[in-house]
Image (cartoon, rainbow, N blue to C red):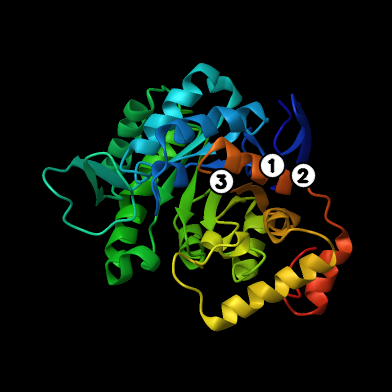
C-alpha cells in the first residue's frame, strides 16, 4: 500500500473492468476509489427497493472495482447494514467500509409512531445518543448487524441543526464531552482507521474542528455542480488540516439526474432555473448533466470520492456510463463564465 499523503493524492488502481483512480483519506493509510457506493437508497429511502436489487448492487459495484462502501444504522433501521455485511463478508479485504454512530436502534412494537421515509424498514426506531457510551454501543451494534469484526471509517451521523434544530446544542455537547473521546479511543487502539462526521451541513463541521482531530467528513449536497456553499471556509480548512471529504448527494437528491426533488423537497423556481441553465451548457458540449454532476466535485483537492446511491445493478451501470464520460475542460470554463458555478471553484 502506498503511504498516504495530502487529501486528493491520486493513485491509479487497475480493475477487471478498467482503471479506477484512488485517493488517500487524510493522513491515514486508507485509500478509496474516487467512485464509492452509498447504501441509503438501497434500504428503501423514499421508495421501495426489491431485495434482489438491493443485495445485488453491492457485489456488482465491487466487481467494477469500487472499494468504498458506506452505510449506517439509520438506513432502513438496520436493513442497509445487514445487506452490506452479507455482501462484503466474503470480500472483506477488497472494501473500505464506512458506517455511522450517534443513533441507537431500539425495538419498535406496534405501528410506527412518527413519520419517516423508509419503505418496509426493519422493526426498530432510532434513539439519538452522541455520548461516549452511545458511540461505543452504536459501534458494537453495527459490528453485530454487519456480521463483521472490522469497520474502517466511523462517522458521527446527522449531528447539527439541520436535523436537531434547537436540541443540537445538547447533542453537540455530548459529542464534545464524551463521544469524541470514544471515537479517538477506537482510532488510537487501531480498532478503526479513520473518524469523522456524516452530515448535510458544513457549518457543524467547522464547529467539529474545534473539538478534535478528524480524518474525513461525509458532506451530502453542499459541494455539487448546483451548489458550492462549502467552498469557503470549510473545504479550504480541510485542505489546510489534511482532512478528506466524501461527497455525498452529488445529484442534490435528484434534480441533477432528471428528478423532481432538491434536498428532498420540491425545488424553488430559482433552483430549477439554475439546474436547467447548467443542463443547457452540458448539452452544448454533448455531455449528460448527471455525468458532469458526478465528476465536478473531484476537481477540488479536498474531495476524495463521490458517493452516488444506486438502487439496483442497472442503476449502477448507468452511473458507470456517466462516470466514464469524457468531459472537455471547456465545459467547466463555460459554466464559470456564465456564473453557474462559484468563481473560486477549482476546475
Which residue, given by chain and number where applicable, does mark 1 sit on? 320
Tags 1 and 2 touching, CB below 8 Å:
yes
The outermost residue toward the bottom is 270
Dot 3: within a 10 Å radius of its alpha carbon, few (fewer than 14), some, or many (20 or more) residues?
many
Mark earlier in primary sequence (3, 2): 3
Could you say where residue 297 lies in the image, as x and y percent from the top left? Answer: 69, 57
Q: CA distance from mark 1 to mark 2?
A: 6 Å
Picture quarter containing residue 299?
Answer: bottom right
Above or below 290: residue 333:
below
Residue at disc 2, secondary structure: loop
| Residue beneath the point at 32% across and 31% down | 140
Can you tell which of label 3 and label 1 is closer to the viewer? Answer: 1
| Residue beneath the point at 28% across and 48% down | 131
Could you say where residue 71 lies in the image, as x and y percent from the top left? Answer: 45, 40
Q: Is residue 187 visible?
A: yes
* Image position of 61 (left or right of 157): right
Q: CA distance from mark 3 to mark 2?
A: 28 Å
Picture quarter containing residue 271?
Answer: bottom right
Q: Nearer the viewer, residue 32 or 173?
A: 32
Could you say where residue 202 lies in the image, as x and y percent from the top left? Answer: 52, 64
Could you say where residue 101 lies in the image, as x and y percent from the top left? Answer: 37, 44
Which residue, given by chain and number where applicable, does mark 2 sit on? 324
Q: Which mark is residue 215?
A: 3
Amino acid at each position: 500500500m502506498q503511504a498516504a499523503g495530502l487529501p486528493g493524492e491520486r493513485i491509479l488502481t487497475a480493475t477487471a473492468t478498467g482503471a479506477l483512480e484512488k485517493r488517500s483519506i487524510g493522513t491515514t493509510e486508507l485509500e478509496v476509489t474516487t467512485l464509492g457506493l452509498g447504501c441509503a437508497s438501497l434500504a428503501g429511502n423514499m421508495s421501495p427497493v426489491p431485495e434482489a436489487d438491493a443485495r445485488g448492487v453491492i457485489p456488482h459495484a465491487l466487481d467494477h472495482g469500487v472499494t468504498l462502501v458506506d452505510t449506517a444504522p439509520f438506513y432502513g433501521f438496520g436493513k442497509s447494514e445487514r445487506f452490506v455485511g452479507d455482501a462484503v463478508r466474503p470480500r472483506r479485504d477488497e472494501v473500505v467500509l464506512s458506517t455511522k454512530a450517534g443513533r441507537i436502534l431500539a425495538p419498535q412494537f406496534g405501528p410506527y409512531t412518527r413519520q419517516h421515509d423508509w419503505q418496509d424498514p426493519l422493526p426498530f426506531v432510532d434513539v439519538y445518543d452522541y455520548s461516549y457510551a452511545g458511540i461505543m454501543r452504536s459501534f458494537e451494534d453495527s459490528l453485530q448487524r454487519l456480521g463483521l469484526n472490522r469497520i474502517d471509517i466511523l462517522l458521527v451521523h446527522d449531528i447539527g441543526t439541520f436535523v436537531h434544530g434547537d436540541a443540537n446544542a445538547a447533542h453537540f455537547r455530548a459529542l464534545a464531552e464524551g463521544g469524541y473521546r470514544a471515537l479517538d479511543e477506537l482510532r488510537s487502539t487501531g480498532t478503526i482507521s479513520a473518524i469523522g462526521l456524516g452530515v448535510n451541513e458544513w457549518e457543524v463541521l467547522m464547529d467539529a474542528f474545534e473539538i478534535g482531530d478528524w480524518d474525513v467528513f461525509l458532506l451530502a449536497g453542499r459541494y455539487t455542480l448546483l451548489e458550492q456553499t462549502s467552498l469557503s471556509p470549510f473545504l479550504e480548512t480541510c485542505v489546510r488540516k489534511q482532512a478528506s471529504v466524501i461527497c455525498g448527494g452529488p445529484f442534490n437528491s435528484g434534480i441533477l439526474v432528471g428528478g423532481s426533488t432538491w434536498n428532498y423537497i420540491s425545488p424553488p423556481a430559482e433552483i430549477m432555473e439554475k439546474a436547467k441553465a447548467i443542463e443547457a451548457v452540458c448539452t452544448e458540449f454533448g455531455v449528460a448533466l448527471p455525468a458532469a454532476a458526478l465528476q465536478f466535485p473531484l476537481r477540488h483537492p479536498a474531495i476524495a470520492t463521490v458517493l452516488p446511491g444506486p438502487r439496483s445493478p442497472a442503476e449502477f451501470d448507468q452511473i458507470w456510463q456517466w462516470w466514464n464520460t469524457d468531459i472537455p475542460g471547456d465545459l467547466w470554463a463555460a459554466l464559470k463564465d456564465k456564473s453557474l458555478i462559484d468563481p473560486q471553484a477549482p476546475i
